[in-house]
Amino acid sequence: MPVRPTAARFRSTSVLTALLAVSLAAPTLTACGSGSGSDPDTVKISFKQSTDNSIHVMDDYLAGIKKQFEKENPGKKVELVPIKAPDSEYYTKLQQMLRSPKTAPDLVYEDTFLINSDITSGYLKPLDPYLAKWKDWDQFIDTAKAAAKAEDGKTYGVPDGTDTRGLWFDKGIFEKAGLPADWQPRTWDDVLAAARTVKEKVPGVTPLNVYTGKPAGEAATMQGFEMLLYGTGDGTSDPLYDKGTKKWVAGGQGFKDALGFVHTVYQEKLGTDVSQALDPNIQTIVRGELLPKGKLAIDLDGSWLPQDWLQGSGHEWPEWSKELGLAYMPTQHGQAPGKVSMSGGWTWSIPAKAGNPDLAFKFIRTMQTKANAQKWYIANSGIAVRKDVASDPAYVKAQPGIKFFTDLVSSTHYRPAYPAYPKVSTAIQEAMESVTTGDASVDKAASDYDEALKAATDNQVVQK
């Protein structure tokens, strides 16, 4: 999508909760729209402001771009309209704003997780006429472009970076367990074997974290389950969605194997206590407590974690690059391509009811110059989606881990983020939670998922 306060932290709560929260969110909205009667020389920009008062990455970045834009465009003004809310509430508040020209801003920060829902609802404007005249669009990698493209073939957002996922491991714990400092598992069994070794030889620490269950929301689906599922099979087809038939894929053997891995982690007590694993704040616990305090051996997680540990973040941990190692997540049996990653990210989109769309795209162009994009990727611990930035030595050397996670882009996968995806994701979380608690066997959980999948997709399901 922290998840991180600007990109990945959106996975922390269930979308179902978000949808149910609409009525509660309404009273907090203000009329900040740019529609009829608005100032044609002012571009209004809404974005997710971190609820962590110690984190100001997006605020500081946009303040700098605002200053540059106003200097380069005399007479034009930028009005920043932050939405300070948990992820689920941000989605609902933003969607409410997009419904009316009275409240719709000119530019919004859209999560690729839900962008297709807003496209289907008619909330966003296709950007193809603008993109066709913007030479920098050729610098964006195809996979990032695809994340903002709808089923109608049109593009509705300009990505401002992406993320990848892998295995973080504590070198100190590994040394105590007799495991190598340059650890790189080749199969799922290698990952589990290392966790079992830690459990045996280093008591008092959590061997392996895999996000699971509905409280963790999209973090469970994406950092957890999909990092497993997309490592099954031969890698030639999407295990969740069949583009040929435009149907969702029922839970086959790969799905059951991924659930089996989750079941093993929690039934063998290789993960956190189940009560902690199902704590809605589990991501904050992992990033802010378990990893920095040497209480977690292996964490299946995202590229953005260092953002929480940088100077001024409120959770400074300058030693992290010396104390933690990085390994890619292997495929199930080590089959080609040998490694797996999932990618998400956010895009800048123009609402269909924006009053000043031309000015909004001009602001996007200012944000997305090579220099400004590079500044954002580094500040946000993000992964470059511009080819010229990704190949720039200054970017590659800016922060430990950047090259490792950027290199994973070549073998990454994007979620099939079609309108039904949020409901599909919730069904996955429910299946994970049932095997985590032991309330259901793997086969029963997979069967229950199939039924939930049919309901979520109007029976648009194919067996494989």
Image (tube, rainbow, N blue to C red):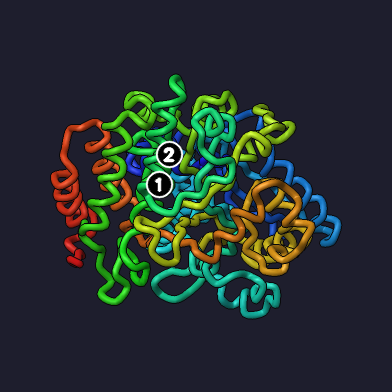
Quick one: 351 or 273, which is closer to the camera?
A: 273
Side of 440 relative to 114 (left or right): left
The residue carrying pointer 1 sits among few (fewer than 14), some (14 to 19) or many (20 or more) residues within 10 Å by Cα, namely some
Residue 125 visible from this viewpoint: no
User: Does residue 210 appear anywhere in the picture?
Assistant: yes
Identify the residue at the far bottom of this view.
132
Tell me the quarter of the image containing the C terminus.
bottom left
- Residue type at mark 1 is Asp
Instruction: Specify the label residue 271 is tagged with.
Output: none
Q: Which residue, as the protein is rendered here, is positioned at the far front?
A: 178
Seen at 32% across and 27% down, the residue is 274
**Residue 313 rendering spot, x and y as whole percentages:** 68, 32
- Give whichever of 222, 365 is nearer the camera: 222
Quadrant housing residue 250: bottom left
Q: Nearer the viewer, residue 204 or 305?
A: 204
Three-letter amino acid code of the residue under disc 2:
Ala
197 sits left or right of 463 in the view: right
Q: Nearer the viewer, residue 146 or 221?
A: 221
Q: Which mark is residue 190?
A: 1
Q: Residues within 10 Å of mark 2 (few under 14, many from 20)?
A: many
Q: Position of residue 389 (x, y in %)?
A: 72, 63
- In the rendered image, the vertical position of residue 301 relative to residue 361, given as above or below: above
Secondary structure under badge 2? helix
Q: Residue at image x 36%, y 62%?
A: 418
- Helix, strand or loop status at disc 1: helix
Count of numbered marks: 2
- Image coordinates of residue 5 in percent, x first then y, are 57, 40
Mark number, residue 194: 2
| Marks 2,1: beta carbons within 8 A | yes
Residue located at (34% from left, 51% from top): 422
Instruction: Using the image, determine if residue 112 lies above or below residue 304.
Output: below
Real-space CA distance between mark 2 and mark 1, rounded to the nearest whole angstrom: 6 Å
